[in-house]
Image (cartoon, coloured by chain):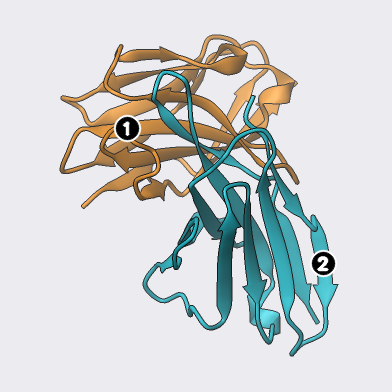
Chain colours: A cyan, B orange
Amino acid sequence: GAVVSQHPSRVICKSGTSVKIECRSLDFQATTMFWYRQFPKQSLMLMATSNEGSKATYEQGVEKDKFLINHASLTLSTLTVTSAHPEDSSFYICSADHRTSGGLETQYFGPGTRLLVL
Amino acid sequence: AQSVTQLDSHVSVSEGTPVLLRCNYSSSYSPSLFWYVQHPNKGLQLLLKYTSAATLVKGINGFEAEFKKSETSFHLTKPSAHMSDAAEYFCVVSEGYSSASKIIFGSGTRLSIRP
């Protein structure tokens, strides 16, 4: 089945530093990947759509200079939280668009990365 | 514009009894609908999906959901709850056939199972 991994699973950093989170589709190629943010006991909020070889599309209210997204290959998208602050602490989840042999597309999700900014 | 409403933030049932998690949607076009489950400290797992084929969709772990256009609903059910079903469940809507289209998550329903 389609597997999506994220690295790291958990990261603690000091305020003002930058943190990079990787999202990989392990056994399929994904033209499109998505980045979500989930606050405790809340639903997922789409942050941006990551398109291989082109600029990411950000949702309203998401700072593109704060959350840098790079989708350099069909199996890897990265999210960099620049100059992180405590309010950026959250659970970040990526998903990858997987097309089956029947042509149906489904999003498969990574296990998430828990970011804590001190 | 599309939206999805999960009517219950928390559902508690006894082990062995039926489960019903409610979901209503709003969509301008023919939607694709999904149910995902999230266990504590784990990633989201696709339970089932509806994409304009059969209205009764069977998923993994004994779950199924029925698409009712007249009621704009896509409720998730399971005949007999198991302790391992305790988790957070999300109803998701996507306009059109492709889930690579923008998708919207419901607010989630936490399912608790009593022994």
The residue that disc 1 covers is B32
Q: Is residue B79 above or below residue A48?
A: above
Dot label at residue A11: 2
Asked whether the beta carbons under mark 1 and mark 2 sit within 8 Å of each other, the answer is no
x%, y% of residue A35?
54, 58
Which image quadrant is residue A54 in? bottom left
Crowding at mark 1 (Cα within 10 Å: few <14, some 14-19, many 20+): many
Q: Under tag 2, what secondary structure?
A: strand
**Chain under disc 1:** B
- In three-dimensional space, the C-alpha distance between marks 1 and 2, rounded to whole angstroms, equals 35 Å
- Residue drawn at (56%, 47%) of the image: A95
Residue A39 in view in this figure: yes
Query: Mark 2: which amino acid?
Result: Val
Q: Pinpoint residue B12: horizontal percent, then vertical percent.
A: 59, 31
Residue A40 seen in the figure: no
Q: Is residue A15 left or right of residue A52?
A: right
- Crowd band around label 2 with a 10 angstrom C-alpha radius: few (<14), some (14–19), many (20+): some
Comparing B114 with A26, the one in front is A26
Q: Residue at x 46, y 75 (%)?
A: A62
In the visual, does B79 lie left or right of A111?
Answer: left
* Amino acid type, residue under disc 1 in the picture: Ser
> Looking at the figure, which quarter contains the C terminus of chain B?
top right
Up the image or down, A27 lies above or below A40; here it is above
Assign a secondary structure to mark 1: strand
Estimate the x, y position of residue B89 in percent, counting from the top left: 55, 36
Number of marks: 2
Residue A87 vertical placement versus B20 (above, below): below
- Considering depth in this image, is B111 or A94 the residue closer to the camera? A94
**Residue at image point 33% right, 44% down:** B4
**Mark 1 and mark 2, same subunit?**
no
